[in-house]
Image: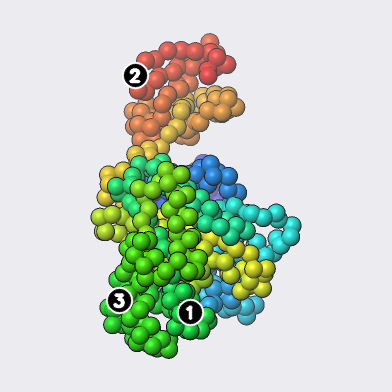
Amino acid sequence: LPTDNARTGRSGSLSSPPVQPDFSEKIDVNPPKGTRDFPPEDMRLRNWLFNNFKEVSQVYGFEEVDFPVLESEALFIRKGGEEIRDQLYCFEDRGNRRVALRPELTPSLARLVIQKGKSVALPLKWFAVGQCWRYERMTRGRRREHYQWNMDIIGIPDVTAEAELISSIVTFFKRIGITASDVGFKVSSRKVLQEVLRRYSVPDHLFGRVCVIIDKLEKIPIDDVKKELRSAELSEEVVEELLQILSVKSLVKLEEKLGTVGEALADLKQLFSLAEKYGYSEWIQFDASVVRGLAYYTGIVFEGFDREGKLRAICGGGRYDHLLSTFGGDDIPACGFGFGDAVVVELLKEKGLLPEVSPQVENIVCSLDQDLQGAAAAVASVLRQKGQSVDLVLENKPLKWVFKRAARINAQRLILVGNAEWQKGMVGVKILSSGEQYEVKVDELE
Ligand SMILES: CC(=O)Nc1cnc2ccccc2c1
């Protein structure tokens, strides 16, 4: 058989013609429908975004957590008639277990809190950035996966927790150049709906389902919303009263309609007062039509929206005081939000705020002579020992090729290992931005 160095090229050999690839086996090189690859330039933008998520979380004193992307299906089976359930990416595994790719992170977080039980001191302030999945039948071309940033506060019953969460999102927006004239938060409380439903003695077990239906306003025709409310055994009178209260846009009007009884108004007043102390009043507005589409919210709910009205909700969250007890845990109060990686990028594009995240490498090292490849590797190691980044040219290439690559990878410095210099223990250095070049002893490189 021919020895390796008898090989003619990268794939042929002297003794037999190159193997013809069997095109019938060519795989589809695109990722599965509704999913994305992250080639380097996209990965740099994603890392920029996620680093901002994580740095804000740390500035607010939150601890990072993570969970499996695969969970028991039971975690997400709720009776609220939610879209998230219709689109659950679920299957039976080889152990005949019903499992699902998580459509959101909050249930996993609740599961971990219960699992940790008394071993963790409340309150907990946890954050996660994780990929979430949905399986949409009609491929409306919508994505089947996205990454969500979640922050949750577990164990605080007061709206001080919600005020802190909204503050953290405002901080995030400011960091990426978004201002209160670009984006706002619509804030309400599901206790408004709860009080109306209780006045008409609608049974509590319908609460989550009614909220999920009401969240469809502005997404489906109002008559369909009314029909769904009627099918949830709500009388015509209650339906009309609900739609009435949802159009209220000020706390003053809310007080007129609801009166001061109940916690909804007190919670909202406290939240707006705290917002003023944080200094983000200009970012938030009361809007009774905000209910959010998840069945488990019980109190304050909020969503970030673009003031031009071109995009879907940027983020959303709220209080979910009974989710843990529905999983068999203690009845621990909780609130949190989810922030997807898709809409915010559309917003940044709209505003011309997408950052230029080019590749960065400090050095490109190459040998000018085949026999000096080892010397080049040694120089690269010296620099790497000092914590410098080095792209080491791994084949014998002409200088022209090296300069082209240096420009492409945005190298700051070119280190040339040449015979003459190497004899003196020196290397050539070229600062690529200024063109300045000089020779230096290897161990004086810094
Ligand atoms: C705008 C967008 O991509 N939304 C999106 C994409 N994928 C998801 C996957 C699971 C749950 C929600 C999702 C939401």
Question: Could you say which is closer to the camera, residue 94 or residue 65?
Answer: 65
- Residue at x 42%, y 46% (from the top left corner): 276
- Residue at x 43%, y 53% (from the top left corner): 272
In the image, residue 312 above or below residue 225: above
In the image, residue 215 above or below residue 361: below
Give the class, few, some or many, for how many residues have Cα within 10 Å of label 2's Cα (few <14, many ≥20): few
- Residue at x 59%, y 53% (from the top left corner): 126
Give the class, few, some or many, for how many residues have Cα within 10 Å of label 3's Cα (few <14, many ≥20): few
Going by the image, does 252 lie left or right of 335? left
Q: Are marks 1 and 2 in contact (CB under 8 Å)?
A: no
Residue 15 rendering spot, x and y as whole percentages: 47, 52
Q: Earlier in the sequence, mark 1 or mark 2?
A: 1
Amino acid at dot 2: Ser
Query: Which residue lies most toward the top here?
Result: 424
Q: Are marks 2 and 3 in contact (CB under 8 Å)?
A: no
Residue pointed to by mark 3 = 220
In the image, residue 159 above or below residue 281: below
Residue 251 rendering spot, x and y as whole percentages: 37, 61
Residue 407 rendering spot, x and y as whole percentages: 35, 31
Q: CA distance from mark 1 to mark 2?
A: 74 Å
Mark 1 CB near ligand 1 (8 Å cut): no
Residue 247 rendering spot, x and y as whole percentages: 31, 69
Going by the image, does 169 lie left or right of 346? right
| Image depth: mark 2 or mark 3 in front | 3
Amino acid at dot 3: Ile
In the image, residue 7 above or below residue 326: above
Residue 198: numbered disc: 1
Residue 434: numbered disc: 2
Amino acid at dot 1: Arg
- Residue at x 31%, y 55% (from the top left corner): 306
